[in-house]
Amino acid sequence: MSLLEVRGLRAAYGQVRVLEGIDFSIDQGRRVAMLGPNGAGKTTVLRALSGMVRTSGTVEFDGRSLVGTATAEIARRGVAHVPEGRGTFPALTVDENLRLGGYVRSDGGAVRADIDRCYKWFPRLDERRRQQAGNLSGGEQQMLAVARALMLRPRLLMLDEPSLGLAPIVTKELFRILREICGEQGITVLLVEQNAGLALDFADHAYVLESGRVALDGEAEQIRGDDEVRRSYLGY
Amino acid sequence: MERFIQVLVDGIATGSIYAAVALALVLIFRSTSVVNFAQGEMAMFSTFVAWGLYEAGVPIGLAALTTIGLSFVAGMVIERVLIRHFEGGDVLTLVIVTLGLFILLNGLAGWIWGFGNRGFPSLFSEDTVALGGVQLSVESLGIVAVLLAVVGLLFLLFQRTKIGLAMRAAALNPASSALVGVRVGHMLMLGWGLAAALGALAGVLVAPRLFLDVNLMGAVLIYAFAAAALGGFDSAIGAVVGGWVIGVSENLAGTYVDFIGSDLKILVPLGIIFVVLLVRPSGLFGTREVARA
């Protein structure tokens, strides 16, 4: 059974319609990539799922509807969203950011243990745990954003352009760690990326958006191997 | 020398009251970026409630504590019922709403309790104690002790508890806070509740030194604004230090500089503020966040 089932998802910013009815689903434990050009609506899909934009259609997460639910309540159901611009707290310390990531959990001891685990996964954060997050480099901030999201022990992890603004070598490192953690923890992932090559290496399945609609979808391997699709939709 | 220390301690005591109101202003400003102009009138209203309980036979200490608790709840209700509808909108709108609340509470208090003034009993004894050969009033020392205890509790709340961390997060970045599951609206409610409780505390501390009437907090609120501006509107430590600087400088100048006396002493702290803000526009302790692009 699918963990996330989306039918006819529409969203608009004021009068400007961005999503024109999108269908997709994600099975438990799978990694799905949302691809497509700038302005196709990839980010808006994530924002709609998180209740950050006015939305219609049906969104069933684990059998319950998310449409019209407040953002904080969606997070409490186990949806962790790393937004564009990372969504960390620059004025708080690295440690405080991670504690906030586990804010909704009531298992205090396990939260502390998970913070230590994050420091093992991201040793750079360990060195800077008492520093303000705003002082970290771009790559370190992105790692903090991902670690912050993992602290929720999410059932669904949504990542918005984690490679944005990072040096290629940092991006590669980030995805290596992500692959390791998500594999180990069996986390279901919805990834939005401009960098199609990177995303298709990471994901099992991919949807390609164009002007607010799903243009095509398929297994990641299949899309990667289809020269025509790559050239016309993904531009690489 | 003895006189000097007495004036100093009295100044710190008065400054502690300004500091309590300034802290209340800072609490709300940090979470909503709005200066709550009704803060003083909320405190005045609370003080009347404490007076009413006292008149009904409740011991003054218990009356004060009960009022602080009631004010906490009332502050949350005001946020939920009134302020919530205007949050996230134009700051100017919210400022006007707090001004409206100011006028409403002032009128309501006059309607209920009348516009005359009345005495308010002190929480502390009227004795003095000798400390190192200097006679100091128990009341002044008590006020300072209460403020220090409150500051300590607030520090523990914000720095050591999960809910305090969430309140700071909600003030800094509401959107990110919602994404980690923080119910931002609840945090704002809590902030208003704490601010109202702090105001009530300041009210029952200051009322014995003045007379209780509907304009009880008028001057105090001005000094509290000054304290918050001096310390930096987003800094709790700044509010306390600002309150003390103003209380002490006002008292010293009023006592030792002949031509100033009690009529012109308000000019002294304002002069200090003018100079400080020229040099440091964000106040003594106002933060400038560091960010790396």
Image (cartoon, rainbow, N blue to C red):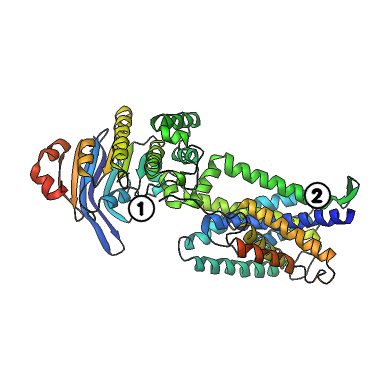
SS type, badge 2: helix
Q: Chain of mark 1?
A: A
From this view, report whether residue B229 is shown above or below residue B73.
below
Most extreme residue toward the right is: B133
- Indicate left or right for B7 with A92 as reference: right
- Indicate left or right for A218 with B167 as reference: left
C-beta proximity under 8 Å, tags 1 and 2: no
Residue shown at 83% from the left, 57% from the top: B7
Q: Position of residue A33 (x, y in %)?
A: 23, 42
Q: Position of residue B259 (x, y in %)?
A: 83, 72
Instruction: Return the residue nearer the eye: B155 or B229.
Output: B229
From this view, report whether residue A134 is shown above or below residue B280.
above
Q: Chain of mark 2?
A: B
Q: Position of residue B76 (x, y in %)?
A: 57, 54
The residue under label 1 is: A52
SS type, badge 1: loop
Type of amino acid under label 1: Met
Most extreme residue toward the left is: A228
Q: Position of residue A134 (x, y in %)?
A: 46, 47
Instruction: Examine the image and state in which quarter residue A207 appears.
Output: top left
The residue under label 2 is: B141
The crowding category of the residue bearing disc 2, from other C-alpha atoms within 10 Å (few below 14, some 14 to 19, many at least 20), is some
For the residues beneath circles 1 and 2, the answer to whether they share a chain is no
Distance in Å between CA atoms under marks 1 and 2: 51 Å
Residue shown at 65% from the left, 57% from the top: B22
From this view, report whether residue A192 is shown above or below residue B106.
above
